Amino acid sequence: MRQAKRVLLTGADGMLGAHICRKLLERDYQVRALVEPHRPLRVIAGLAVEIHYGNVCDPDTIARAIEDCDYIIHTAALTQLWPARLARIWQVNYKAVITLAEAALRAPILRLVHISSASSFSWGPAHSPGDEGRKYCGARYRLDYLDSKYKAQQRLLAYHKARQLPVVIINPTFMLGAYDSRPGSGAMVRAVARRKIAGYSQGGKNFVAAHDVATIAVDALQLGQLGECYIVGGRNLSYQRALRLIARCAEVPPPRIPLPNWLVLLGGLFSSCMAILLRRPPALSYRMAQLALEGAYYSSAKAQREFQFTPSNIEQAIQELLQWFKREGYL
């Protein structure tokens, strides 16, 4: 008779998914990883994980994957900001979430832990950071990634209210850590380590260790209130301070040039135009440039209170990422 609880984990081949896989196994959960066919799985290679191949957008795939599972942790998402509008983003970040919720209600699943984004709530300045009580402000940037994550979150909350979907929503800020195989959020760290960044914009954001988010995601299988959202963050840092910190960890000189807002926006506009002509993603699109000027700071007081959560030292996450980059040949 099966005693260990089985968790269906989507997006196990991503940075956060790889951390969650390891955390689940540490706590003696059985892990069924839903991954797309032909995706490289080196970030979870050698782990005692049941691999289930399929498309997260396909209802039949979800129905088969969810069989005999007690819980779901849903991390799979498209996080790209270019192009700003893309139908595929809505298929993965919104429609697949609804499909998963419907399957969870039919199963039934004890808990669905959904990984959303802190950007589904309005951020704030350093002296008044955003929290779960702030309304969404990202619509003005016209980015399908931001809009799709927010809409999916709202739909899940509505499912909980109307149909008692046992969902807990985790809203991470900007994650850094090992297993960033694209690289994604770690591209900033890699660029600083390679001395490819000379200046910094006037904005900032909240940085969190990916292993902290993984811990909270697994904790949420038992802790946290159903139908509630939890921002999971670490340190609020201006880009100047963040880049200095990364440079110190990488043992390279830090970027020293403060970039005026008009130059950041002009660079983003030029890069966007060139990306259209060359048909390749820009390093900094115009929408990304707009976001880079914001002080996108958050508070994770609610998660700290209800999960007894104390953020890790972000330097540790940066060091882990740098070490992983070196092992994988990214530096």
Image (cartoon, rainbow, N blue to C red):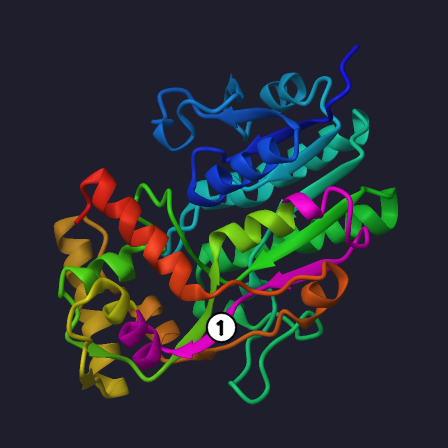
How packed mark 1 is, by other alpha carbons closer than 10 Å (few <14, some 14-19, many 20 or more), is many
Q: Which residues are magenta?
A: 218-245
253 inside magenta stretch: no
Above or below residue 14? Residue 280 is below
Residue 187 picture quarter: bottom left
Residue 148 visible at all: no
Amino acid marked by disc 1 = Arg
In the image, 243: left or right of 295?
left
**Viewer-nearest residue: 205 or 214:** 214
Relative vertical location of residue 328 with respect to residue 227 in this rendering, above or below: above
Task: Judge whether 96 appears above or below 93 on screen.
Answer: above
Where does residue 8 sit, x and y in percent of width and height? 63, 28
Q: Residue at x 27, y 65 (%)?
A: 249
Position of residue 86 in the picture relative to residue 99 (left or right): left
User: Left or right: 298 with respect to 263?
Assistant: right
Give percent across and percent down for residue 58: 56, 25
What residue do we see at 40% from left, 60% from top?
316
* Front residue of this view, candidates 270 and 109: 109
For residue 229: magenta? yes
Give the residue at x 51% y 85%.
126
Q: Is residue 175 above or below residue 108?
A: below
